[in-house]
Each structure stands twice: as structure tokens, then as C-alpha cells.
Amino acid sequence: LILFDGFFHFWHRQHHNSRVLYKNVHSVHHQFNAPFVWVTQYEHPLELFTVGVLSVLVPISLGVHPLSQWAWLLLAVYLSVDAHSGYDFGVLDKVFPLWGGAVHHDRHHLNPRTNYQPFFTWFDYYYGTIFKEEAVATKKMS
């Protein structure tokens, strides 16, 4: 989960920093400002394929047991659906202080230049890409 989260942060950020990738691939996912469950897999086919391959290759590269890989894939899909559900159940953020969850990802859809990590938030804090309320307030005023 941690390794995938790190890879995804950089991959996701690159899709927002590259006009070509954002316009032709990632913008499909961002057609919705307020995500809901079905938006989880609402992506360009190339993006869906790449995320699927990343999700499978990380456990394989670690040499995990096939049952562990299956459990990982179920967990990844569950957490992705949870992040796009629009509901903050407030459970995992109490266990993991740097957990992102639905609020973290909702804010990413409000301000797409922030909150690139899918599960945790430490890279977003470290690289200064964490959502800031002032950024949205300024954007609304202009």
C-alpha cells in the first residue's frame, strides 16, 4: 500500500503537470468536481490500464504470495471506491494520522493541482501539494 501510494503520487502529479497527459488522458477522470463511487473507474482506457498494471506489478515485484496479491487488489479497489464515495467515515484517519480518504480526494477534485496521493498524505505535505483552503477561496474570487 505504501509503495503503490508513493508511485501513484508521482505518476498522478505528472498527469497534472503535463498539458498533453492531462488534456488527452487524465481530464476524463476530472470531468466530475464532486466524485461519487462510479467515478473511481471513470478514466481514459490508457489510464485505467496503467493503474491496473501498477496495481499488479508492485506486489509481483515484492514477490508476495498470490493470495496476498488478491487481498491487495481487493483492498486497493475498496479504498479507491471509499475515496470517491463522497462520505468521510472517519475511521482510518484515527488509526493512521496521515490518512487521506474521501475528504482528501474530494479536495483534489475541487483543486486538481493538490492532493495527488490516493491513500496517505505525506508526499503531498513534503512536496507542498497538500490542499490549502486559501487556494480555493482565491480561485473563486477571480
Image: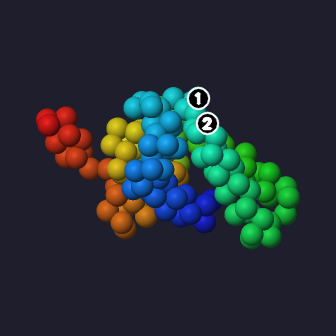
9 left or right of 141 in image: right
Q: Nearer the viewer, residue 116 or 66?
A: 116
Q: Residue at x 36, y 66 (%)?
A: 127
* Picture disc at residue 76: none
- Tags 1 and 2 touching, CB below 8 Å: yes
- Vertical order, 133 against 17 (above or below): above
Residue 27: x and y, percent? 46, 39
Residue located 34% across and 58% down the image:
129
Front residue of this view, candidates 55 and 80: 55
Q: Looking at the picture, how far across and down is residue 103, in whole percent? A: 41, 41
Q: Which residue is mark 1?
A: 38
How far across and down, in percent of the image, does residue 37 sit? 57, 30
Label 1 sits on what residue type? Trp
* Residue for badge 2: 41
Q: Is residue 98 left or right of residue 66?
A: left
Label 1, secondary structure: give it. helix
Residue in the image at 52% along x and 44% along y = 25
Disc 2 crowd, CA 10 A, few/some/many (<14, 14-19, 20+) = some
Q: How would you rate the neighbour count of disc 1 (Cα within 10 Å): few for under 14, some for 14-19, many for 20 or more? A: few
Which of the image's four quarters has the N terminus?
A: bottom right
Q: Farthest residue toward the right?
A: 66
